[in-house]
Amino acid sequence: MSAHEEEFDEVAGALRRRLGLNRRQFLAATTGVTAVAAVSAVGPLASAAYASPGGDQERGQGHGHGHGDRNALVPEAKRGIILYTVRDVISRDPAANTSLPAGFRRVFEELSRIGYKQVEFAGYRQHANAEGGADLETVEGARLLRRWLDDNGLKAQGNHGFIPGSWPLTQADLDRFKLTLEIANILGMEHVGTGGDPTNSAYKADWDLAAQKWNGLGSIASAAGLKLYTHNHDAAYGFLLDEGPLDELGRPTRSSGIRKLEYFLRITNRRHVYLEMDIFWAHVAQYKHRSYVARNGSTRTDIFDPLKLVRQNEKRFPLFHAKDGKANTATGNGYDMVPFGTGDIDYRAFFSKLDIERRHNPMYEQDNAPGGAEEPGRSLQYADLSYKNLAALRRRH
């Protein structure tokens, strides 16, 4: 694909998401000729496709949009947060304490005030007393959420949501998956995914089956103009059992040395299946999953390099969870979760080796951000601190 064609596709996609249309609806609404005219790089609609409702640029993808400080490792337009970090605020009863924000709309207002430009959903439920009601996982609910996002200059980039359990798909699972994609398009997302691994198995045969399923689901998502992604913790970076003596059930007991997600990347379609690296959990994997038993019974050491994996597959990691950790070898994971920029994971080194502006969307996450009844405002305080530290990352000269 030529550079001109890539730019055409990018601007067309931005316009389609801004209008809340899926790919098929967009193509039906335009002929080839009018589509070219509509998304010409210099035309007024191209500008509209990139501009957020508040006047900020939606995409910082090499077109002079959202650049701000060119020394910033993470451009302003790419600074995001997964809403799981502030789930306590979303689920709070607004009637119980009117002095504290509660529900999606108020959360969007607070995150916009802090400076965030992107959000990743972790479901669409909030407290029943919040504006819009408890369950917004409907077409009507998505339109309401989209209006609130637009009002606050926020772009939705993805969601940890429904992935069908069946394969081959039951009609019920297919229908629900299509609704998931429709909602994502209404919200203007580029990506849709899940917070779980393709399979929890260590065996090659199960990963082969998972790859078949994800290739199929990814093809459906691509047809809707979306990139399907899986988000993974440390277990998925463990070693695949694919060699050696078989156990009593006929399963391999030893490894060739390939990690499960590396194998998954190798056998899935790069046009349809994508990943979201949780950089904290990838470093936990580096700490925990250091050796394997080879076919001949010997123990071999292989230290995982998260950055190397991304650089080898950079186009397949459109999303990151930017989660920080303080080294603590007294724990099984080797790290304790802390606000972004206060830990020991070298994000400056990590991000400086990648094309964040064009290819990646870092989402701040902290599982333990909610402070409970004793510190009801803590998750938003951590979101504020973490945004400042994310924005402060600078390139080395």
Image (cartoon, grey):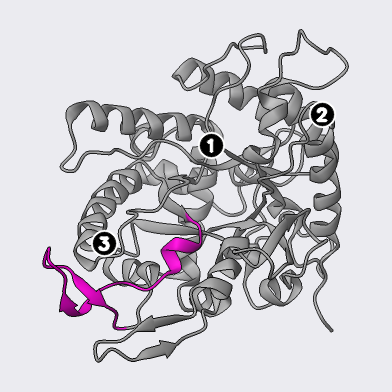
Tag 1 secondary structure: loop
Q: Quadrant of residue 266?
A: bottom left
The 10 Å Cα crowd at callout 3, few under 14, some 14 to 19, many 20 or more, is many
Q: Which mark is residue 207?
A: 3
Question: In the image, is residue 160 above or below residue 306?
Answer: above
Query: Residue 196, percent across and down?
Result: 43, 48
Tag 2 secondary structure: loop
The 10 Å Cα crowd at callout 1, few under 14, some 14 to 19, many 20 or more, is many
Identity of the residue drawn at 66% across and 60% down:
63
| Magenta span of residues | 232-256
Q: Is residue 158 left or right of residue 345?
A: left
Q: Is residue 99 visible?
A: yes
Q: Is residue 38 left or right of residue 68?
A: left
Q: Which mark is residue 188?
A: 1
Q: Nearer the viewer, residue 190 or 9?
A: 190
Identity of the residue drawn at 29% across and 83% down:
256
Of callouts 2 and 1, which one flags the residue occurring earlier in the amino acid sequence?
A: 1
Q: Which mark is residue 376?
A: 2
Tag 3 secondary structure: helix
Depth-wise, is mark 3 or mark 2 nearer the camera? 2
Query: Residue 114, percent across and down?
Result: 84, 40
Identity of the residue drawn at 63% across and 62% down:
280
Quarter of the image that includes the C terminus: bottom right
Depth-wise, is mark 2 or mark 1 nearer the camera? 2
Q: Amino acid at mark 1?
A: Gly
Of callouts 3 and 1, which one flags the residue occurring earlier in the amino acid sequence?
A: 1
Query: Residue 395, percent across and down?
Result: 80, 75
Of callouts 3 and 2, which one flags the residue occurring earlier in the amino acid sequence?
A: 3
